[in-house]
Amino acid sequence: MQGLTFITLGKDLESSKELSKALSSSGCGRVLAEYDNPTEFLTNIARLRPSAAVVTLRQDHLDNGFALIKEAIAAAPATAIITASSEGSPAMIMGSIRAGAREFLQLPVSPDELRTVMEHVAEFCRVTHNAISSNSRLIAVFSGKGGAGVSFFATNLAAAMNTQTLLLDLNLQAGDAASFLGLDAKYSLVDMVRNGARLDDSLITSFITRHSTNLSLLAAPNEAHEAEEVRADDVTAILHQLGQKFETIVADLPHTFDPVTIAALDMADDILLVLTLDIPGIRSTKRALKVFDNLGYPREKIRVVVNRWSKNIDVELQKVEGHLGERLIGFIPNDYRKVMDSINLGRPLVQTEPASKIALEIKRIAGLTLEKSSSASPLPRKKSLRSLFGSKNSTTSLELSTVIDNA
């Protein structure tokens, strides 16, 4: 998961909000939680293990502040402590550094100073191996419209990973990942949310349903109304904690841009955007890419995968790529009977029929996604994109092009 993570402590609400806004808008940091109670702050710094914790100091309570810094370092030695204040006297700055703080931020925050502090924190995290991006990878599977086969793909993608993998079902009102894996999940994401204040490794493990040696599931809530209890901030904090436990997390997302979905997309290392080669599918994919651009996501973290591929479909793939501005990195074949048998039996196809064309392509996409370099060639092609689909009907291609241009 890319970027640094922070928690903050401060009694001054205005200063805390300004600080959190500066950290979040810096482009390289995400605030996991804000606290105004020192006891709660110390409890959660050990639980969340953020990259850094920012403590706002007051001139009339310096001794308490310095003692708190020492306690925070003892509770989370791999977290960089940053102090901040609008006063910034020499005694405050030197005292906080001697107590163990790594940086001091003068409020209001200067962009240049914040950038320097971020660079120092990133280096500290690199040295201490605390940067979560070095340990875990979050892959979000999304489609701009329903019925594209996202859950089937996400489930099989997770099952194809050769790492300790968690499948996270974020279809909060109608998640089916448990049935796709043939599991009866006793607990769900909402149980983690309800116990957020006391989550530790053993409690997290108790809420997760084991499927096989490398694959586990955190299920969607059993009841639709329970979805209301899950907020975007909850998902951010939980993903951060899960990233310290699993090498790979595959998030099965709904096809709506709600706050919970965006929270997961924000933290994703890779977004696999599932496309079906029909006019609604192409239009919804184009709209989704525009939303990603507006959210500031770099295009290199987005990869488009074609589901239900068939050479009988009259679509010029080069034109589709041109309209989307993205290469198509995978083509999952259309085999209705195999897919439905897999779903009805609750057994991932990549495990029951590993040599099938669908399984081989999903496993290839899984391997591609886990590659560290995003510059790898997505799909070696001996033939042109047009020849993948055989002969073309020029009228169909013209109609498709016109529809997309008007989307």
Image (cartoon, grey):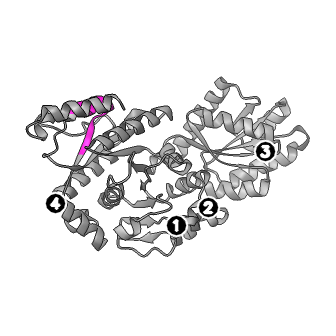
Residue 8 on image: x %, y %: 71, 45
Q: Are marks 4 and 1 in contact (CB under 8 Å)?
A: no
What separation in Å lies between label 1 and label 2 (alpha carbons)? 10 Å
Q: Earlier in the sequence, mark 4 or mark 1?
A: 1
| Amino acid type, mark 3 | Gly
Mark 3 surroundings within 10 Å by alpha-carbon count, few (fewer than 14), some (14 through 19), many (20 or more): many
Residue identifier under label 1: 221
Mark closest to the chain's N terminus, 1 or 2: 1
Pointer 2: what residue?
229
**Mark 2 and mark 4: Cα distance apart in space:** 40 Å
Disc on res. 10 = 3
Membership of 329 in magenta stretch: yes
Residue at 32% over, 59% down: 152
Query: In the image, which is nearer the foreground, mark 2 or mark 4?
Result: 2
Q: Is residue 188 visible?
A: yes
Mark 3 touches mark 4? (CB < 8 Å) = no
Identify whether 294 is placed above or below 42.
above
- Residues under numbered marks 1 and 2 in contact, where contact means CB atoms less than 8 Å apart: yes
Front tag of 3 and 4: 4
CB atoms of marks 1 and 3 within 8 Å = no
Residue neighbourhood size for the residue with mark 2, other residues' Cα within 10 Å, grouped as few (<14), some (14–19), many (≥20): some
Q: Position of residue 327 (x, y in %)?
A: 27, 35
Q: CA distance from mark 3 to mark 4?
A: 57 Å
Q: Nearer the viewer, mark 4 or mark 1?
A: 1
Which one is in front, 38 or 344?
344
Identify the residue shown where x is 56% and y is 51%. 236
Residue labelled with disc 4: 356
Alpha carbon distance from label 3 to label 2: 26 Å
Question: Start and end of the magenta stretch?
Answer: 318-330
Left or right side of 257 for 93? right
Query: Residue 34 versus residue 230: which sits nearer the camera?
Result: 230
Task: Tell me if I can see residue 213 in this picture.
Answer: no
